[in-house]
Amino acid sequence: MTFTDTTVTGLDDRWRNADRPRTSAEWLDRAQQVADILAVDAVERDRANATPHAEVRLLKDSGLVTLLGPTAHGGAGETWETAYRIIRTVARGDGSIGQVLGYHYLWAWAARLVATDEQITAVEELYTSNNFLFGGAVNPRDSDLTIREDGDDLVFSGRKSFSTGGQISDLTVLEGVLDGTDTHIFAIVPTAQEGIVFGGDWDSLGQRLTESGSVEIRDVRVPWASAAGFVEREFTPLVYNTLNVPTIQLVFANFYLGIAQGALETASAYTRTTTRAWPYGGDDKERATEEWYVLDGYGDLASRLWADEALLDAVGAEISAVLHAPREELTARRRGEIAVRIAAGKLRIVDDGLQIATKVFELTGARASASSVGLDIFWRNLRTHSLHDPIPYKKREVGAYVLLNDVPEPTWYT
């Protein structure tokens, strides 16, 4: 099956008359259906490197885009604990689309992180009732967008090197600094406007379908009333506002886990059906699945993934409870403890995932290196995004907690 717009149109009927998932388990099953569809031609789509309009339509048709949206507006009203598992599941079929969905969930929650109650209600109704997908122009390593005041409007201008979601998004999250101040302002704007110009220059080794290229923001106007969290042009900070980074770091860890799981599943299927036993070892076997080193290898890799999954599930439950609790309750200490646990989970799945994505070639054999098999996609995807921020700094954060009982101060990366 070739994954084209025609295929997706045909797939509309897959869920049109189906019962809407009612439980977390049913939503996870829906996500697995999406992953199965994506996995069929993930390698071919990666090579074509086309803008993933059809893939986003699949996410929308399946209902996954509004997973966290309020039930009153047609959303599932699910928790972040479920969302993390959904991201992981979709990434098993296609790491790029798992990332797109994960970033969408973070930006869909952005209003809850910093906005007023009225703004939260308006944003969640807008995106949920319209089945909109979010993108974001908030790369912290670049200079911030500049914001100038013009009467009752704010005017955003500047350039970002990365903006995941790009032209496949319906809404874009902007962040910048108000001229003459150190005040950061977030705003949510429609993507389709003249002032948002995507560079179309995403040319990476992996995660090729994430639409993560550069974007120019050219005098995009936002009413002061839409500045997230501002009342009478003043912002009252909460510790809860800083949860954006731990939340997205755990998004990363979960689609890394999904990519690694996809690698192991693809490799094991190949070994069962195609890998030949080695006839020169002195303990010859009829099938590769009987060879001790193959069994040993898969056992080692699977145990790593099961341990990583257990850790990510545990910390996912922790941060989910905090994200869905009253915003005023979160303390700096609790926020820091969760950030450390997420750092530990992330560094483990990066190390284990890269080992898995490499080791599977030894377990499948020389013929599995053929481009037609496509095992390279998992290493390329995981290697590319795991460079987002240096893992040694995550190890340092965990070490400082263990040795000194210190928790990291909130930054754009912790």
Image (tube, rainbow, N blue to C red):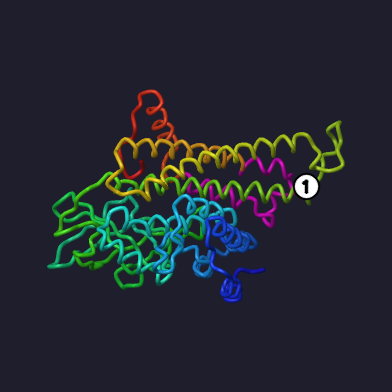
Considering depth in this image, is 38 or 144 the residue closer to the camera? Answer: 38
Instruction: Say which residue appears at 27% left-offset and 66% top-offset.
Output: 218
Q: Quadrant of the C terminus?
A: top left
Residue 368 place in picture, x, y as percent: 71, 49
The number of numbered badges drawn on the structure is 1
Q: Main secondary structure of the magenta part?
A: helix
Element type at mark 1: loop
> Which of the 4 image quadrants contains residue 400?
top left
Instruction: Say which residue appears at 44% left-offset and 65% top-offset.
Output: 75
Residue 334 place in picture, x, y as percent: 34, 37
Residue 4 place in picture, x, y as percent: 59, 72
Q: What stretch is highlighted in magenta?
A: 357-386
- From what the image shows, is residue 360 above or below residue 6? above
Residue 269 counted in the magenta span: no
> Which of the 4 image quadrants contains residue 353?
top right
- From what the image shows, is residue 15 above or below residue 381? below
Q: What residue type is labelled 1?
A: Thr
Q: From this viewpoint, is residue 321 visible?
A: yes
User: Residue 40 vs residue 134: left or right?
Assistant: right
Q: Name the residue under label 1.
A: 275
Residue 384 counted in the magenta span: yes
